[in-house]
Amino acid sequence: MSPTRPPLADLHEAAGARATEFGGWEMPVQFDSIRGEHAAVRGSAGIFDVSHMGEVYVSGPDATALMDRLTTNDVASLDPGEAQYACILREDGVVLDDTVVYALPEREGFLFVPNAGHNEEMADRWREHADALGLDAIVEDRTEDRGMVAVQGPEAIDRVEGVTADSVSGLSRFSALETSIDGVDCLVARTGYTGEDGVEIVFEADHSEAVWSAFDGVQPCGLGARDTLRLEAGLLLSGQDFHPTDEPRTPIEAGLGFAVAEPGQRGGEFVGSDALDRVREAGVEERLVGIELGERGVPRHGCPVLADGEEIGHVTSGTMSPTLDLPIALAYVDADHADGGTAVAIEIRGDGRAGRVVDPRFLRRHRSNGE
C-alpha cells in the first residue's frame, strides 16, 4: 500500500523537500539541511507539517469517563482549553502509545493526538471500550480530514501572533484556544515536540495551504530536524523508545511517571493501573537514561551500552547533537547503573566510546548550567 500523502505534499515537492515514509505517511524529512533547520528552531522559528499525527475526537455524555479509563493522566481535572500529556497502556502496564489530550475550548468533548499510524487502532480501542463499559460516547477519527502544523522556536509566538485573529501571547503551556488564520478556523495549542516554545495548529485539511502560506518567511522543517530537536529535549519517540512488542516498557521504566496519575489522585482506575501499582512496589530492572559521550561517534538505535566491558543495556535513540556538539543517546540500562555520572561506554562499530549517564533532558541541563 502506498503511503498517505499529506495535504501539503504538492507544496513540499515544489519547495524541493526530500520525502520519506513514516508511520504510513509520505512526509518531508528535510527542505534545506537538517542542521540548518535545527538551528532555525533553536535560534528563531521553524514550521513543521505534522499532519501525519492522529486527530481523534471524543464527545458525548460519557466522554470524560472514557478518556479517563484509557489514558493515564487525570482527564477529569481538565477545564475547557486545557491539555495534558498522557500514556495509553495495555492491561500489563506496557505503553502502547503516548498522546496529548485537549479539552476543547468552545464545545464539549476532547481531541487526543495519537502518533503517526496509530489513529485507527486507537479509535477502534476507544469504541470497543465504550461498548464494553456501556458508555455513551462518540469517537471520530478525523486524521485524514485534518491538517496540523507546528510553529516552534523562541520567535514562534511572535510569528503566530502576527497571523491569528485573536491574541495567542497569553496562552499558557498546555492550553489552547480557537481562533482563525487567514479566515481558516483553527485550534491553536501551546504545545510542541522540540524543547522550544511554540504552538501546534489543527484545522480542516482543505485549508492547509492557506495556513502554511500565512507563515511565509518562517523556515520550513522536516522530520530530520524534528528528531534531533526532540532528542536534545529528551522527548521519547513512539515506536522507537517504547514499542509494545519490540521495546515493551512501562511508563516507570521509560521515565514517564509524571504522566501517570498517582493512586487516589483521580476518581477511578485506568487500563493498566493495577499493573503499574505492582511495578511501583517491586521496582524496575532497567531505566531510561541519557548518555553523553566524551569521544566522537554517533550512537544509533540498538548500540550496546557497556560498563566495565559488560553489556548493561542498549541505545534506543542517538545522534550527534547539533546544539551541544556532543554525541547523545537515550538508552535503557540496568537500574544499578542508572544514576547520573555513572561511567559507561556505547559500542559503535565494535569500539566502545566512553561517556557518562546524565539527565535525558540534555538541552535543559546545558542551558541551566550556562553551557
Image: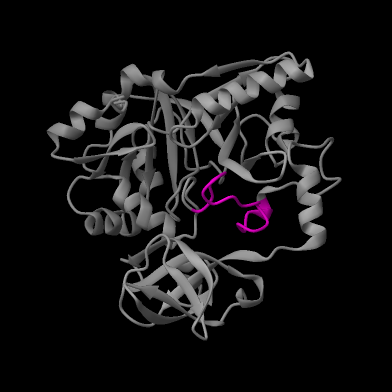
Residue 31 shown left or right of residue 228 in the figure: left
Q: Which x, y percent locates residue 199?
A: 44, 41
Q: Is 197 placed left or right of 81 in the picture?
A: left
Q: Position of residue 315 (x, y in %)?
A: 46, 64
Q: In which quarter of the view is residue 181 placed? A: top left
The image quadrant of residue 228 is: bottom left
| Picture residue at 13% right of the left edge, 39% below the top | 16
Q: How is the image coloured?
A: one colour
- Check residue 248 for magenta coloring: yes
Location of the C terminus by quadrant is bottom left
Whether residue 151 appears in magenta in the rendering, the answer is no
- Residue 184, position in %: x, y? 37, 20
Residue at point 37% right, 68% down?
A: 299
Q: Is residue 131 left or right of residue 34?
A: right
Q: Is residue 263 visible?
A: yes
Q: Nearer the viewer, residue 173 or 14?
A: 14
Q: Residue at x 64, y 24 (%)?
A: 126
Instruction: Report whether 325 appears left or right of 270.
Output: left
- Comparing 56 with 253, the one in front is 253
Secondary structure mostly seen in magenta is loop
Q: Is residue 295 above or below residue 101?
A: below
Task: Specify start and end residues of the magenta stretch as a single range.
Answer: 241-258
Q: Residue furthest bottom?
A: 308
- Would residue 106 be seen by someone viewing this image from the given angle? no
Decide which of 234, 126 is in the foreground and name it: 126
Across and down, in percent, residue 43 comes to 31, 59
Looking at the image, which residue is at 40% across and 74% down? Answer: 347
Is residue 41 shown above or below 68? below
Quarter of the rendering occupied by the N terminus: top left
